[in-house]
Amino acid sequence: NAGVTQTPKFQVLKTGQSMTLQCAQDMNHEYMSWYRQDPGMGLRLIHYSVGAGITDQGEVPNGYNVSRSTTEDFPLRLLSAAPSQTSVYFCASSPWDLRDYARDEQFFGPGTRLTVL
Amino acid sequence: KNEVEQSPQNLTAQEGEFITINCSYSVGISALHWLQQHPGGGIVSLFMLSSGKKKHGRLIATINIQEKHSSLHITASHPRDSAVYICAVRSTDKLIFGTGTRLQVFP
């Protein structure tokens, strides 16, 4: 198993550019989520999905879009990059679902370090 | 006020010391997680708790649901335990994270 993979590892964008951060998992997990990590702050939830075809907003969704067409993939799109989006982005997956709260071990990708100039 | 508070924010220790990191939360939860973030940035899951106590090697995690408090203990600390330790709680369908405790263990 590759676990949770994220690409790219590093990215530099200019203000106004768009891009997609890729996230994939091969563990057949229903729950996937995107977080950003900024200095002095905890991980903050951007968007999450409880299964294919279902997405919802987290704490800081503005400027980001997601889709979940398959169980495996959960890409994060930056529509028009801004310097405030400079951050480290983590994707995570978990077998958690509403029917079984106990199955909630978290698996994180290695992160993408994004700089917006 | 943050919904998940960790203390201390920073902790230094000598090798062999007993370490305690605390986490308090103010929301209803179905589970509490302890995670470790290595200096290289990777995040791994250490424990998931909904009650009582769990032990894995030199790590022990406890939770008191009534007091909305959890502790992570490291016995016989070692320099390789140097990392950021993160508490997170599962509240409805979201995880809420604390800001982390940075631990440095010196030989």
Image: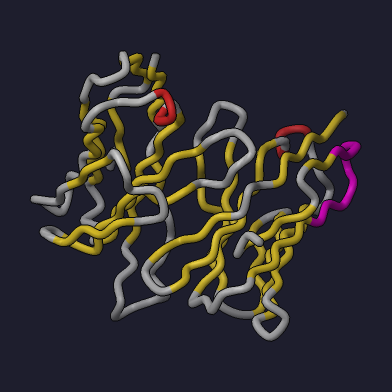
Observer-nearest residue: B46 or A91? A91
Q: Is residue B77 left or right of residue B27?
A: right
Choose top left, top right, bottom left or bottom right for residue A94: bottom left
Q: Is residue B33 left or right of residue A50?
A: right
- Of the 4 image quadrants, the one containing the C terminus of chain A is top left
What number of labels is visible?
0
At x 25%, y 32%, the residue is A78
Residue A48 higher or lower than A41, as above or below = below
At x 39%, y 76%, the residue is A101
Q: Which residues are magenta?
A: B12-20
- Of the 4 image quadrants, the one containing the N terminus of chain A is top left
In percent of width and height, residue B15 lies at 87, 37
Q: Is residue A106 left or right of residue B78?
A: left
At x 30%, y 71%, the residue is A97
Choose top left, top right, bottom left or bottom right for residue A76: top left
Would you say residue B16 sits in the magenta stretch?
Answer: yes
Would you say residue A96 sits in the magenta stretch?
Answer: no
In percent of width and height, residue B5 lies at 68, 59
